[in-house]
Amino acid sequence: MSSAISFSPLLNKDLANKSDKTLLGTKGNKGFFANYKIFKWIPKEPFLGVEAQQEVVNWFNANYNNNNDTDPVLIVIEWDVNTNLVQRTQIINHIQVNTTVAPQSNNNPSSTLFCVTGRDAGQTVEDAISAVRRNMFQRNGVVLARIFSIKAERKDLFEIIEHWDVFA
């Protein structure tokens, strides 16, 4: 479990509005904790890989309508460059099967984006991340990727949640 957010060295830490959150949810009779960080991101300040940043901005320009709960939420998985392609495919398929959310087509091998729409987009995102956490988490294993959910708050300002303890 991380004790602090792992900022990219390129992110202006003064620009990020950070807060700790712990979410307690239930699945059946068992409880689980999900640790995550919330912070603000302005596209002029790099955070994700260059290709992923451009895809997020393109997604915003294509999908953002107004500032309400029905706006789409984006799940971004930023892969470790050494991650095996089979593991990536398995994780992507697992998300599709468990939540019926399909990845957006892109040519960027370093990240995968899922656009989640509808009134319950936030819950769908949590379901997808919980499904991956339950099946892919390996304590003290190799970290396969970092996973984020991104919501546009307004033009040129995004709320990013980095979800911890998903892969390792």
Image (cartoon, rainbow, N blue to C red):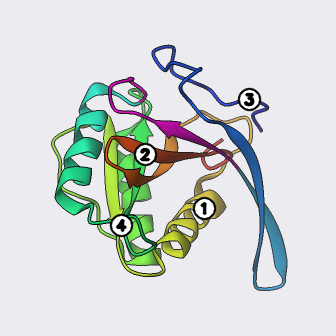
> Does the rendering let one see residue 10?
yes
User: Could you tell me how far apart the alpha carbons at marks 3 and 2 are, in whole angstroms?
Assistant: 20 Å
Secondary element at image label 1? helix
What residue would you read off at disc 2?
158
User: Could you tell me how far apart the alpha carbons at marks 1 and 4 are, in whole angstroms?
Assistant: 25 Å
Q: Which badge, 3 or 4, comes first in the chain's sequence?
A: 3
Location of the N terminus by quadrant is top right
What residue would you read off at disc 1?
135
Q: Which badge, 1 or 4, comes first in the chain's sequence?
A: 4
Counting from the top left corner in percent of width and height, residue 141 is at 66, 36
Q: In this view, does 42 lie to the left or right of 163?
A: left
Q: Is residue 33 left or right of residue 151?
A: right
* Residue 91 in the image: above or below residue 57: below
Residue 72 - label: 4
Residue 4 - label: 3
Q: Are marks 1 and 3 in contact (CB under 8 Å)?
A: no
Q: Which badge, 2 or 4, comes first in the chain's sequence?
A: 4
